[in-house]
Image (cartoon, helix red, strand yellow):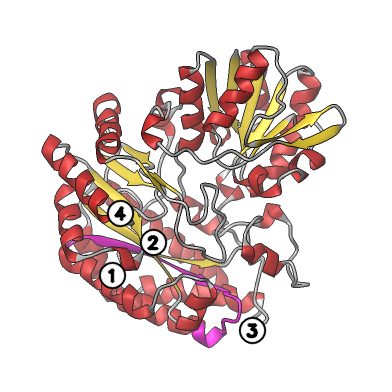
Amino acid sequence: MKVMLIVPPWTVLDIRAHDTQGIAGFWPPVGTLYIASVLRKAGHDVVFRDGGFYTHAEMLREIDREKPDVLGAFVIAMFWERTRTLFQDIRKRHPKMFLLAGGHGPSAFGRKALESLPELDAAVISEAEYTVRDIVNRLDAGETLAGVEGCIIRVGNDIVENPSRPFIEDLDELPFPAMDLSDWQRYFPSYGQVRRMPSFQVISSRGCMNDCLYCYRLMGRNVLRFRSPKNVVDEIEFYVREFGARDIKFWDESFTYDRDRVLGICEEILRRKIKVTWWISARADCVDREMLEMMKRAGCWCINFGVESGVQKNLDMLRKNLTIEQIIQAVDLTHEVGIQTFTTYIFGIPGETFQEGLETIKLAKRLNSMITEFFPISPFPGTDLWNMACTSESFSRDVNKIGLLKDEIIYAPDTMTHAEVGELRRLAFRDYYMRPKFVWTYLRGIRSWFEIKAMFAGALALLKFTRKKEC
């Protein structure tokens, strides 16, 4: 059976403010490419198109040309309206094509995805590889989708919620993402997240043991599944051999939950003498000196720590389950070992005041990371923050406006105005990046031409952002 997997058409301005689009990038959607590899293993003909490279009209022409039996779209919440328009046009041109959607959007919306889009035949909920495979296998055999775990289906005029699907326990059994189906040479990462090109993504674990207020866990809350060190390094070596990879970004929620596994991955990289640099995310309470030193030896050059706030009560509101002291110790230790840090902060936390936002800026400057991002808090459908925000009259619930990096501040707590949240971001970027100490830290850490390009692009975006707000 022929299956076409897509990301609906989108542009950088759909996810980024005008002033910072120059530093934005995007990656191949690894989750969708995992589905593609599982479908190919099951014997189906698979093609992939990323809407980041196509207009609406161009995507329709690609679908007309490929004429798939099944079309599946990966959809995040903020792209739902775009998907609706696309699917309506597809249905007019291809009345018998089976249309399904998955990703964070449909998983959060549930049956409402089918209620709001009559053209949609099925929505895949949560982890999708085996659900999509089973759907396509059933369709290929001329069978109904009754009982297929992990999806919501349309049966005549009815919407039927099938049983949920257990998470995949043995992640090593999955084939590597079908990167060859993507135009991988055309992708480019956001500046600050990569040291050298070409760079590829690896997901070495799924799930998260934390329960943050603002986060929707597509791969499960309080459920962690790990790939073996050998399997992870096999994938890295595959990208080096087949695509010339020089840098890897790990997309795990927290790479360092399992200390022994981290050491095993490092040992495997060193044993095979694989020359790659790599970037991870970690919790501040899940690193120690021995681990960091081993990671440094194996090529780790940067760790992303989600700091979020410089005020303990705000961390507690976010359910971070961390202390300010733990964060300071982890970042300082990482710098001592010689690994750079990328720290993130949030303004507009429920109950946060403007003065407390200034304390967050003070902590950011104290930590002095190589790259720092300051986000307005953004409620996403399916999160506890969304449910909290929906009680506020000032929150529009418009999914098209959702995003951490857009111009408009869509949510503010009762203790601040929208304008104050925006002003904190402006002050944070100005006061953080326009310090001699930061400039010296950044220049001292540059190791590649890509980082030099990142420096100039970031400086231009910073000037546009701060000047615009001052006018």
Is residue 469 shown in magenta? no
Question: Alpha-carbon neighbours of circle 3 within 10 Å: few (<14), some, or many (≥20)?
Answer: few
Residue 120 spot, x, y in % from top left: 75, 32
Give 125 or 443, whichever is nearer the viewer. Answer: 125
Residue 364 spot, x, y in % from top left: 37, 75
Region in magenta: 338-356
Q: Secondary structure at mark 1?
A: helix
Residue 426, placed above or below residue 197: below
Tag of residue 415: 3
Q: Are marks 2 and 1 in contact (CB under 8 Å)?
A: no
Q: Amino acid at mark 1?
A: Val
Quarter of the rendering occupied by the C terminus: bottom right
> Distance between the Cα atoms at labels 1 and 4?
19 Å
Q: Amino acid at mark 4?
A: Asp
Give 84 or 433, whichever is nearer the viewer. Answer: 84
Q: Which residue is mark 1?
A: 331
Location of residue 325 (image quadrant): bottom left
> Distance between the Cα atoms at labels 2 and 1?
24 Å
Residue that appears at 41% across and 40% down? 188
Tag of residue 459: 2
> Distance between the Cα atoms at labels 1 and 3?
30 Å
Query: Sequence-wise, which precedes: disc 1 or disc 4?
Result: 4
> Distance between the Cα atoms at labels 3 and 2?
32 Å
Residue that appears at 17% across and 48% down? 298
Question: Alpha-carbon neighbours of circle 4 within 10 Å: few (<14), some, or many (≥20)?
Answer: few
> Distance between the Cα atoms at labels 4 and 3?
39 Å
Q: Which residue is mark 4?
A: 258
